[in-house]
Image (tube, rainbow, N blue to C red):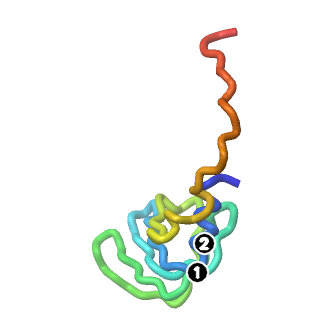
Amino acid sequence: MSLCLKLLHESQGHIVSMELENGSTYRGKLIEAEDNMNCQMKDISVTARDGRVSHLDQVYIRGSHIRFLIVPDMLKNAPMFKVGPARGTPLPTRGGRR
C-alpha cells in the first residue's frame, strides 16, 4: 500500500478537505476511505465552483473524481513518516540502453 493511501486511511475520523475535478470543495469528517480512494464523509460543507456554500449530512465520493485532499496537520507526526534504521545503500541503477 502506498504512503498516500496509508495517510488517507490515517485521516479517517478527522476533518479533511477535498477538491473534486469539477472545482467544488468538500470539507467534513472522513468516515471511511477505501483503497481506490472512494470516501464517505459526514457533516459536510460544500463550496461550489462559483462560491455558493451548502451543507450535506452525508456524502460518498468516487475516488477517481478527487483532485486533491487536505488532511489534518497533526498527521505530519504519524509513525509512517518516522525514519527507521538505515537499510543499506540503494543498488546502483544502470542508465541508458542495454
Mark nearer the N terminus (1 vs 2): 1
Q: Residue 29 shows which numbered tag?
A: none
SS assignment at label 2: strand
| In this view, the mark in front (1 or 2) | 1
SS assignment at label 1: loop
Nearest the viewer among 18 and 13 is 13
Q: Is residue 88 left or right of residue 96?
A: right
Q: Residues within 10 Å of mark 2 (few under 14, many from 20)?
A: many
Does residue 43 sit above or below 23 in this rendering? below
Q: Position of residue 79 (x, y in %)?
A: 61, 62
Q: Quadrant of the N terminus?
A: bottom right
Residue under label 1, please give it. 13
Task: Name which residue lies at 65% across and 16% down.
Answer: 94
Task: Name which residue lies at 66% across and 21% down.
Answer: 92
Q: Amino acid at mark 2?
A: Cys
Mark-to-mark CA distance, 1 and 2: 12 Å
Does residue 74 sit above or below 79 in this rendering? below
Q: Amino acid at mark 1?
A: Gly
Q: Contact (CB < 8 A) between labels 1 and 2?
A: no
Q: Is residue 35 left or right of residue 56?
A: right
Nearest the viewer among 51 and 72 is 72
Residue under label 2, please give it. 39
Task: Name which residue lies at 61% across and 12% down.
Answer: 96
Q: Position of residue 13 (x, y in %)?
A: 58, 81
Q: Position of residue 51 (x, y in %)?
A: 28, 75
Nearest the viewer among 36 and 49 is 36
